[in-house]
Image (cartoon, grey):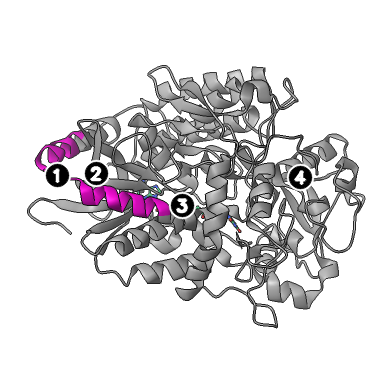
Amino acid sequence: MPGDDGYQHDLLVIGGGGAGLRAAIAAAEESNRLSIAVLSKVYPMRSHTVSAEGGTAAVMRENDSLDTHAKDTIFGSDFLADQDVVEVFVKEAPGEVIRLEHWGCPWSRDPDGRVSVRPFGGMTVNRTLYAADKTGFHMLHALFQTSLKYERITRYDEWFATSLLLEDGKVCGVTALNLHDGQMRPIVAKAVIMCTGGAGRIFPFTTNAAIKTGDGMALAYRAGVALKDMEFVQYHPTGLPGTGILITEAARGEGGHLKNKDGYRYLQDYGLGPPTDTPVHRKMELGPRDILSRCHIQEHQKGRTFDGPDGHYVHLDLRHLGEKLIDKNLPFVRELARNYVGIDPVHEPIPVRPVVHYMMGGISTDITGKTSLDGLYAAGEAACVSINGANRLGSNSLTELLVFGARAGRAAARHALERPTLRSNPLAQLASDERRRLDQRFLRADGREKIADIREEMQKAMESGCGIYRDRATMEGTCQTLRKLRERFAHISLADKDAIFNTELIAALELECTLDVAETVARSALAREESRGSHTRTDFPKRDDARFLKHSLAYRTPDGPRIEYLPATITRWPPEERKY
Ligand SMILES: Cc1cc2nc3c(=O)[nH]c(=O)nc-3n(C[C@H](O)[C@H](O)[C@H](O)COP(=O)(O)OP(=O)(O)OC[C@H]3O[C@@H](n4cnc5c(N)ncnc54)[C@H](O)[C@@H]3O)c2cc1C
C-alpha cells in the first residue's frame, strides 16, 4: 500500500472479475518477489463474472478431442478466429478447469463421480462443465478465495481507474479515484493488465450488469492501442423481455424448446431441423447464437411472435423436462422466471427475446495478452486475443478468462521482473493534472446537458444502427448521432459536486467511455461490407473472404476512429461455408 513513494507496485491488474483474479494469481505464482495489486470499481465478487450461469467449455471426455473443440470454435467464429490462438486455448483449457476444481470450484458431477458436461450451442460434443446454473458465482468464488492466499496481492476495492499513465511511450500505472474519499491517486506499476470486462451497456437492452461500460477498452484506446473486431456484438436469443435478464443457454442444453405463438418449434424452418426430443448438437435450439437471434427476427417479421408490453417474444418451453431436472440443473432459471416474469417454468413456458450479451471485440492483444503499448496487457472480455472471431460460442468465454488471464498474468509478471524500478514523482504530477481535468470538466462545469439524456440517445442510436440486422444508411445515422453526442457531452453538468462516493461522477466517466466504445463499434461495422457471424448487413448479405477475412483495428483520431485491418491467422481449417 502507500509508502513514501505513494502507491507503487510491480504489477497492477485493473478488474477483479474472473480474468483479473486469474491473472493476479498467475503472476503471484510466477514470482514471490513481485508486489501485485488488483484494482476494481466494485468488490471483486460483484464483477459480472458472478452472473454467468451456463458453464465453461473444455475437452474432458474420450468422445471429444482438442481438434473438435478447435473446429467448433473456428466454425462458430465464422472463420475470423485466429486459429493458432484457438489451438492454444483448447489445449490449455482442461488443465485450467481441473486447477479450478483444486482451488475449490464445485463442478456438478455424474453419478459415476466424473465431472458432468452438458451440450451447448454450436458445440458438437458435450463439453460444457457447470456448477448447476450458477457457474460464474462458483468460479469467481474459487478464484477470489485463492487470491486471498497471497499476501503479495494488494486490493484496491471500489477504486475507479480513469486513465493510463505513460512515460516515454511506456505504461507506468494508472490514475484512479478512490471512491471512499474522492482522492485521485497515481498508482505506479511496471506492468498493467486490463481485465475490465465488456461493454454491453452501450445498448439499451442487455444482459450485462450496469458496470459493463467498456472503461478499460476506452482507456487503452485513448492511449493509442487499437480496439479489434468491435463490430461483432453478440445477441443472446433468450433474455427476459423488459429487464434483459438472461435465461441461460443451459436451458436449451438440457432440452428446452423454442416455440412461436402457434406453439411450433420454428427453428426447423431455418435449416436447423429436424426437431427431436433430445438435443441434437448444433441443430434446432442448439444452433449458434447469431443464427438463432436472426431466426427470431425473421419469425417476428412473419407475424409469428407474441406481442407484449416489452416488445415481441417467443416461448422457451421447459415443461417436458420435469420439475426434478429443472430443480437439479436449472434452479436459477426457475428462480429468475418466477421473480422477474411471475412464471414457473415447471408449469408454463418462459417469454424470451434476443438481447445484447457479449462483445467479441476488445483491446487487441497477442497470444500472451500483450498489447502494442509497452507494459500494457489485457485479458478477458475487455481483450480481443481472437478466439471468438465474428461469433463466440457459449461457454468459451469463462474458459477464455482462465486460459488468457493466466497467460497475461505470467507475461506481465516477467515484464515487471525485467523492468527497472520506476520513479513516481513525475507521475504524481500527472495525477494532479487528471484531478484538475475532472474538476474542470465535471465538478465545476455549469453546462445544461444531462448524463441520462445522452446515455439514452446513444443506446437508441446503437440499437437502431448496430442491432441484429444492419445497413449503410442507418449505420451512417448512428455514426453522426454519436459524433453529436460527443459534442453535447462536453456540456454536461452534475448535480452532485461532492468528492466522496460521487456516483454521478462515476456515471459521467462511464458514459465518456461508452461513447468512445460505441463509436468504434459503429465505425467498424460501417466499414465491414459483408455479413459474417453476428454482423449481418442487409445491403451486403454474403460473407466476403476475398475482402474481409481480416480483423478490423479501430485507432483513435480527433475525428473519430480510423479503421485498419489485420489478416486472420488460418492454420489447419481453411474457410468453408458455415452451414449447420
Ligand atoms: C448474465 C451473463 C451470463 C453469462 N454466462 C456465461 C456462461 O455461462 N459461460 C460463459 O462462458 N460466459 C458467460 N457469460 C460471459 C462471461 O461471463 C463474461 O464474458 C466474463 O465473465 C467477463 O469476465 P471479465 O473478468 O473479463 O470481466 P468482469 O467479470 O466483467 O469484470 C470486470 C472487472 O473490471 C472492473 N472494472 C471495470 N472498469 C473499471 C474501472 N474503470 N476501474 C476499476 N475497475 C474497473 C470491475 O469492477 C470488475 O471487477 C455471461 C455473461 C453474462 C452477462
Where's the C terminus, which quadrant? Answer: top right
Provide the residue designation for mark 4: 292
Where's the N terminus, which quadrant? Answer: bottom left
The three-letter amino acid code for the residue at tag 1 is Leu
Q: Earlier in the sequence, mark 3 or mark 4?
A: 4
Magenta stretch prevailing secondary structure:
helix
Residue 486 versus residue 5 in the image, above or below: above
For label 3, the SS is helix
The three-letter amino acid code for the residue at tag 4 is Leu
Relative to 432, 393 lies left or right? right
User: 10 Å neighbourhood of mark 4: few (<14), some, or many (≥20)?
Assistant: many
Depth check: give the residue in front, 13 or 93. 93
Provide the residue designation for mark 3: 404
Q: Position of residue 345 (x, y in %)?
A: 77, 66
Provide the residue designation for mark 1: 422
Provide the residue designation for mark 2: 173
Q: Are marks 1 and 2 in contact (CB under 8 Å)?
A: yes
